[in-house]
Image (cartoon, grey):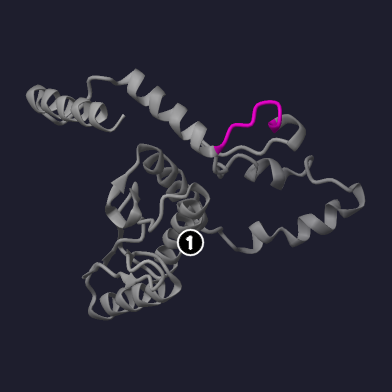
Amino acid sequence: YYTLLQYLDMRSGRSVTHGPELMALCAGGAAMSAHYGIPSLANTLLSGDCQPHQIMFQYGINILQGLLNGVTFQAGAGSLESGNLYSHQSLVIIDDMLSYLKTFRNGMEINPETLAVDDIIAMADKGEYLSSKLTMKYLRKERRFESSIMNYPLLSTWSQKPETMIDRAEAKIRKILAEAPDQSVLPVETIRELDGLMASAKKKFD
């Protein structure tokens, strides 16, 4: 069951693909799909703008609400301006966000052993739990999420080299292309024609 939801921005007259009302409608569509036992698809990976910080907010909250509302397939990855533009950097950022939220969705195992009540009581006097056998048992059992484009430096460190997540996404794109420049599902002739169109457009708009 597929819904492409948009609303009219009263300030500009543009069709916009993000907003709290649209998220509520998306949740309703997902609930209807679940009721009838069919998969659902929603354009939750769309951004309605081209401003980087606003895009990050829209991507993050759209993906999360789709996940929490049970949307089966989330579509629109890399889209800017409600589908008028696409961005390689956005694709990389969305991929990282999806990995982040998949880790969140996995949740955690709750049972008497993982609650570790007896172990907490036994180790309380020591003031640490690193020497606990239970800690050693679970320390590396579950891998923590490791982002490829987010990091957490101190302001004093970051100010020496003030890279943004977009900068790191661009670096990742270059690395991917450098390591696999010839991997494409398109025929060589099609690639040449597309390259020609891009070169012509660049010459026209530069």
Query: Residue 49: where, in percent of width, then height?
Result: 40, 55
Query: Tag 1's secondary structure?
Result: helix
Q: Nearer the viewer, residue 98 or 93?
A: 93
Tell me if mark 1 has few (under 14), some (14-19) or many (20+) residues whose alpha carbon lies within 10 angstroms of its own: some
Residue 59 shown left or right of residue 34 in the figure: right
Q: Nearer the viewer, residue 26 or 111?
A: 26
Residue 5 shown left or right of residue 194 in the figure: right
Q: Main secondary structure of the magenta part?
A: loop
Query: Residue 22: where, in percent of width, then height?
Result: 37, 73
Query: Is residue 162 inside the magenta stretch?
Result: yes
Residue 27 shown left or right of residue 191 in the figure: right
Can the viewer see residue 75? no
Query: Residue 135: where, in percent of width, then height?
Result: 71, 45
Task: Please say if 125 is above or below 26.
Answer: above
Can the viewer see residue 11? yes
The quadrant of the picture occupied by the C terminus is top left
Query: Is residue 200 inside the magenta stretch?
Result: no
Quarter holding residue 30? bottom left
Quarter holding residue 81? bottom left
Task: Please say if 105 is above or below 127.
Answer: below
Q: Which residue is mark 1?
A: 61
Q: Residue at x 45, y 73 (%)?
A: 20
Q: Residue at x 35, y 18 (%)?
A: 178
- Range drawn in magenta: 158-164
The quadrant of the picture occupied by the N terminus is bottom left
Please, what is the three-letter code of the amino acid marked with disc 1?
A: Ile
Q: Residue at x 84, y 51 (%)?
A: 123
Q: Nearer the viewer, residue 138 or 71?
A: 71
Q: Residue at x 30, y 63 (%)?
A: 72
Please count the marks in the image.
1
Task: Please say if 176 is above or below 147.
Answer: above
